[in-house]
Amino acid sequence: MGAWLTWVIIGLLLVGLEIVTPSFFIIFFGIGALAAGMIAALGLNLPWQLFAFLVVTLIGLFGLRKFVQKGLAGPTTKTNYNALVGKTGLVTTAIAAETGLGRVTVSGEDWAALAETNAAIEVGAKVTVVSVSGVRLIVRRAEDSH
């Protein structure tokens, strides 16, 4: 078996391994091995093959990995209840000072609410969602959120 075929087999195995391990690390060694296989197919000796392997692998690891990972990740968007944090809502059932419990409407949805502090908040008051605990929104009076 020729050196070029050995490099190509190693390269394909490494690229295949990357498919089952989404580390986005091994693929650059596979691409480096494929580059070394092309150099071997051109008839250049082992030092040139190793040089091609190292250069292509290092360029991939240090030059491209960060950009490709960033491109694959895409923009991050808050979803589900995390998207409610920071939004303003309206108290629909008064939040009692003793329990801190009540109900609010945020983005058109009705939620159980818990006041951040032990203060009563009347029906119709605007509140800001501070965080989420289980199925309850933790809220504070909108004027206090600045």
Image (tube, rainbow, N blue to C red):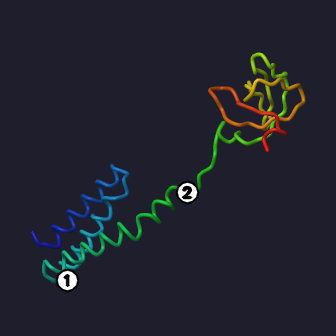
Residue at image location 68% in from the left, 42% down from the top: 83
Q: Secondary structure at mark 1?
A: loop
Answer left or right for 91 relative to 4: right
Q: Are marks 2 and 1 in contact (CB under 8 Å)?
A: no
**Total marks in image:** 2
The spot of residue 53 in percent (x, y) is: 24, 72
Instruction: Classify the position of the N terminus by image quarter.
Output: bottom left
The residue to which callout 2 is attached is 74
Answer left or right for 55 relative to 145: left
38 w.r.t. 107: above or below: below
The residue to which callout 1 is attached is 42
Q: CA distance from mark 2 to mark 1?
A: 39 Å
- What amino acid is at disc 1? Leu
The spot of residue 105 in percent (x, y) is: 80, 31
Near-viewer residue (92 or 97) = 97
Q: Residue 136 occupies which quadrant of the picture? A: top right
38 w.r.t. 64: above or below: below
The spot of residue 14 in percent (x, y) is: 26, 59
- What amino acid is at disc 2? Gly
Near-viewer residue (66 or 122) = 122
The spot of residue 37 in percent (x, y) is: 21, 73
Marked residue nearer the N-terminal end (2 or 1): 1
Near-viewer residue (134 or 36) = 134
